[in-house]
Image: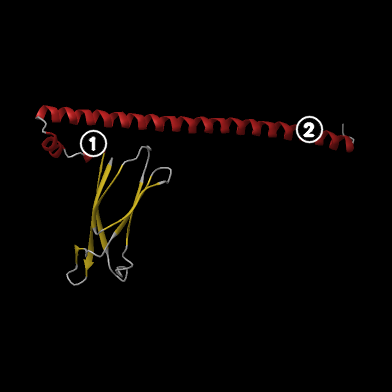
Amino acid sequence: MVIGKYRTQLWDKQTSSFLPSTPGLGMHVEIKDPDTKIILSRQYGSDGRFTFTSHTPGEHQICLHSNSTKMALFAGGKLRVHLDIQVGEHTNNYPEIAAKDKLTELQLRVRQLLDQVEQIQKEQNYQRYREERFRMTSESTNQRVLWWSIAQTLILIVTGIWQMKHLKSFFEAKKLV
């Protein structure tokens, strides 16, 4: 699970500082997984929070687009975006969970440890996936190098045989041999 919180600020020329943006300014959030499939595509306000879960391991793309063309922002204006992303176990608010489920301190700590173990398992699975992908890439590269060297050797042998026949016919034509 990934939680993202953002806040936008507009540049004010009169005060020469960034001020909280107006409610009319919005942000379009688009999230793609490593296979470039869109997981989330939504329009939010100037301050917002988005959440997504992905079962595909790898690097995800999070794109924030402002509707600033409607606000004539790029007529010399500037926009600042504060982005806070929380991933995995850090997304859980444990004091809130303890209050809601009426957990003791020991039960809450056990839940935190279980979440950490789950996060470690996910990380290990991701590392196994990366290792498998790297191994496949290495084996493919090694196979290509092998075939390339075989092709070079064959080309050299064929070129050598051709040169010997050509030189033999040359010397026979000149009656040197």
Dot 2 crowding, Cα within 10 Å, few <14, some 14–19, many 20+: few
Marked residue nearer the N-terminal end (2 or 1): 1
Residue that carries the numbered disc 1 in the rendered image: 89
Relative to 2, 95 lies left or right: left
Visual colour scheme: secondary structure
**Depth order, front residue of 176/137:** 137
Closest to the observer, 120 or 1: 1
Pair 2/1: label in front = 1
Residue 52: image x %, image y %? 30, 44
- Give the spatial CA distance, label 2 vs label 1: 72 Å
Q: Give the crowd class for mark 1: few <14, some 14-19, many >=20 residues within 10 Å.
A: some
Q: Which residue is mark 2?
A: 164
Query: Residue 53 bears which disc, if any?
Result: none
Q: Is residue 149 above or below residue 22?
A: above
Picture coordinates of residue 103, whole percent (x, y): 11, 31
User: Residue drawn 53% across and 30% down?
Assistant: 142
